[in-house]
Image: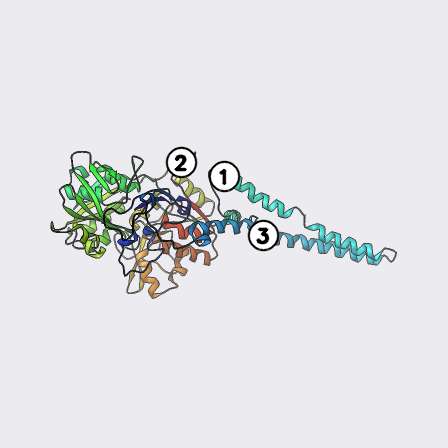
Amino acid sequence: TAVVNEAVLTGESTPQIKESIQRRPADEALSIKQNKGHILFGGTEILTCSRAEGKGSRFGPGPCDGCVGFVLRTGFETAQGKLVRTIVHSASRVSANSKEAFAFIGVLLCFAVIASGYVLKKGLEDPNRSRYKILLNCSLIITSVVPPELPMELSLAVNTSLLALAKLGVFCTEPFRIPFGGALDTCCFDKTGTLTEDVMIMKGICTSSASTILQPMDMAQEVQYVLAGCHSLVHLDGATVGDSMEKAGMQSVGWVTRGTDIMQSLRGGRSLHIHQRYAFSSALKRMSTIVITQKSEFFVLAKGAPEVLQQLFVSVPDSYEEVYTELMRNGFRVIALGYKALPGSAKPSSLKAMKREDAESALHFAGFAIFECPIKPGTTDTITLLKESSHRVVMITGDNELTATHVAAVTCMIEQPPAFLRCVDGKAEWVDGLGQPVSVSDRSSGGHALCVSGEHLSGLLKADPRWLHAWVARVPVFARCSPDQKEQILTELKSLGSMTLMCGDGTNDVGALKQAHVGVALLNSSLP
């Protein structure tokens, strides 16, 4: 296991856990995109690493008890090499937009041709004037129009912008994109960590009623186990580091990390050890762990999107959908919690080989964890300023559509009631917040702000691949989007001729950041 800082590549300063490749199915093909949790990328900083204990590894111990790795790429093919190549090759383009420069030169050339034509005409009318001097003067007029210092001035403008950005704590890897900033007409934002604060606040646990929020400390032991043992947090330099939502959940039940994959309760002798971790997947929208307690009991702990985990539970309350829908409508981030006890005869070696599908089946519903993410100061003023300057503002987030539209309304990104896309038999239908159909046509939104979720978008694109191209310019909120869908949305906006900006802070935004004309990655770390 290794803990790395990938901020140089993704813009996300939260350390990431990298698990051994041996923990994935042997018959599964390796994918750089899908198996990021098993790959160390060049240029990232390794904060800590530990080798497998006992007989869990097929290889011998590495140097200095480190991890044993297999080299996949070298040189410019590594993640760091690609970044260096981008910087090196963009250096020759540190200038203003070449099209604008040529247009400027073309205008000057027109005046020069007119002026030299006039001089030539008048000069030829005088038979005593030297024809050589006339042609020389015409040539000087044409060649003198373009100032020789123009390329230097254009480069100086961009370099001055680089210095100004550096003073503001902004590091630019592709300076040729700076002039694009003056032509932007569409600004896209991620939600969590971009429009809202990085810090999550744990509000409590809900089970059968959205109006009844219980404190995690008062819940059953299994519920506390899920919050304390199902996460990707690491113990580094005497502190717990990782995702702010997971830290808030662990703190709410009074648990702390005590070492690699070891958690301990501050209110007694209870402890948990993560025996196996199935990392969070954007495609699956869930994560799970297999833990062992101080009493040598084994549990499977899981958390994820409510609509995803609902299919994995043995049974759910009748008001399951109503509760999490109401909570999301109020702007909360809602995570479903689940667990199951494994038989006492289970052996650690067999649990290591357990498939994810088997571990995450027949779970018991433990409740909804409710988190609140305050909106950053200045977010509403910035959005309002962008709209007043005729910029189109779009939210592209992986969060639930009800939470996304609530934040969009609070920040004045949308001013009309939302209408949500539903894919029914390959056709698009629109409903309001209560699920009632609303009238939305190709020409009119019917007084609603449109919201498209990634799930229904995928269904529509299978039936009509051109649907997104036709509607992307009219949708201000995209929710439950995977990283690939975020990138696809930016691609479609660019294909319509929009000059786009993407602002995000996490690994899920990397593809979209690269696809936009201007990509802004926010770092969580404070400036020196």
Q: Earlier in the sequence, mark 2 or mark 1?
A: 1
Q: Nearer the viewer, mark 1 or mark 3?
A: 1
**CA distance for labels 3 and 2:** 37 Å
Q: Residue furthest right?
A: 128
Give the x, y percent position of residue 181. Answer: 50, 47
Q: Which mark is residue 22?
A: none
Query: In the image, what residue occupies the spot 39% across and 49% down?
Result: 41
Q: Earlier in the sequence, mark 3 or mark 2?
A: 3
Residue 306 left/right relative to 454: left
Q: Which residue is mark 2?
A: 526
Residue 26 in view (yes/no): yes
Residue 211 in view (yes/no): no
**CA distance for labels 1 and 3:** 25 Å
Q: Which image quadrant is residue 430 in?
A: bottom left
Q: Nearer the viewer, mark 3 or mark 2?
A: 2
For the residue marked with disc 1, what is the amino acid? Answer: Ala
For the residue marked with disc 3, what is the amino acid? Answer: Glu
**CA distance for labels 2 and 1:** 14 Å
Q: Are marks 1 and 3 in contact (CB under 8 Å)?
A: no
Q: Which residue is mark 3?
A: 100
